[in-house]
Image: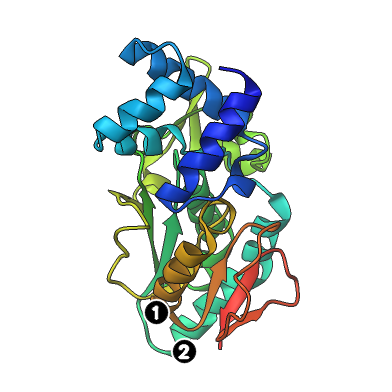
Amino acid sequence: MTDRQCVEFLQWALPQLGLRWAGFRKVRGQVRKRIVRRLNELELMHIAEYRRYLADHPAEWTVLDACLRISISRFFRDRDVFDHLRDSVLPDLARTASQRGEQRLKVWSAGCASGEEPYSVALIWSNHVQPEFPELELHVLATDADETMLQRAEQAHYPTSSLKDVPADWKQNAFVCRDDEYQLVPQFHALVDFRLSDIRQAIPADAFSLILCRNLVFTYFDEPLQQQVLAALAERLLPGGYLVIGKHESLPANTTGLVPDPARLGFFRRA
């Protein structure tokens, strides 16, 4: 399958899944490899045959949807975002929760991939925030639609490349090096609960002080689906809570009730 054939196929298929071509333009190379692998599994020679196969086998759309998931993750990816979480947002949320007499601060990491994002929040909390608020517990719910990714997250084994932005002293205290991989110690693992869930189909029932939904909905979903998911996210956000999207993403036009943080970086606060 040529690059042009891949582009034509994606421009045809993506809208039928509530996805948009603009989000896939830069990652089409890895998507093409997955689709070619699927064609080989089905013993199909041409992408046109796959289009016919999709028409004859509606369940195959679920398989294609899985081929389109993009998981790029590492600890403290976009370091300035996590610096702002460390220095401003998490302490502010902890202070508010403490003043309310709450005992737990709830965070949701949506599209958590192999767990680096929620574990990064756990590291910041344990090393920087909790010493000032010892009476307050952190609970991070981490969800993803990819079961394989969640299995990796539960195992919490990472290569050196995933930890390149972790401060040296945190790395030493939070990980054990085994066979050229780093194992997260139980203390930090215990702060995160993982759940298999597709944000297009289900939203957790809890209310959260912080929702991280980065480089997913507002990159890959089409605008009607963005609006639908955003409304659900806003409903789950406590007053004064933060929604964090990708630093290069933007919310749909005419979004109300969410105020951009002065630092920008994809932070929005519920009024």
Residue 206 x %, y %: 30, 72
The residue that appears at 58% across and 42% down in the rendered structure is: 75
Q: Amino acid at mark 1?
A: Glu
* Tag 2 residue: 99
Residue 7 x %, y %: 60, 33
Q: Amino acid at mark 2?
A: Gln
Quadrant location of the C terminus in the rendered image: bottom right
Q: Which mark is residue 38?
A: none
The residue that appears at 24% across and 36% down in the rendered structure is: 59
Q: Residue 149: in sight, yes or no? A: no
- 109 above or below 153? below
Instruction: Tell which tag, 1 or 2, sits nearer the viewer.
Output: 1
* Tag 1 residue: 235
- 84 above or below 146? below
Quarter of the figure with residue 265: bottom right
Quadrant location of the N terminus in the rendered image: top right
Q: Residues within 10 Å of mark 1 (few under 14, many from 20)?
A: some
- Ranked by sequence position, the earlier of labels 1 and 2 is 2
Question: Position of 138 compared to 1: left or right?
Answer: left
Question: Position of 258 compared to 34: left or right?
Answer: right
Secondary structure of residue under mark 2: helix
Residue 98 x %, y %: 45, 83
Residue 182 x %, y %: 50, 27
The residue that appears at 52% across and 20% down in the rendered structure is: 33
Secondary structure of residue under mark 1: helix
The residue that appears at 66% across and 72% down in the rendered structure is: 88
Disc 1/disc 2 C-alpha distance (Å): 22 Å
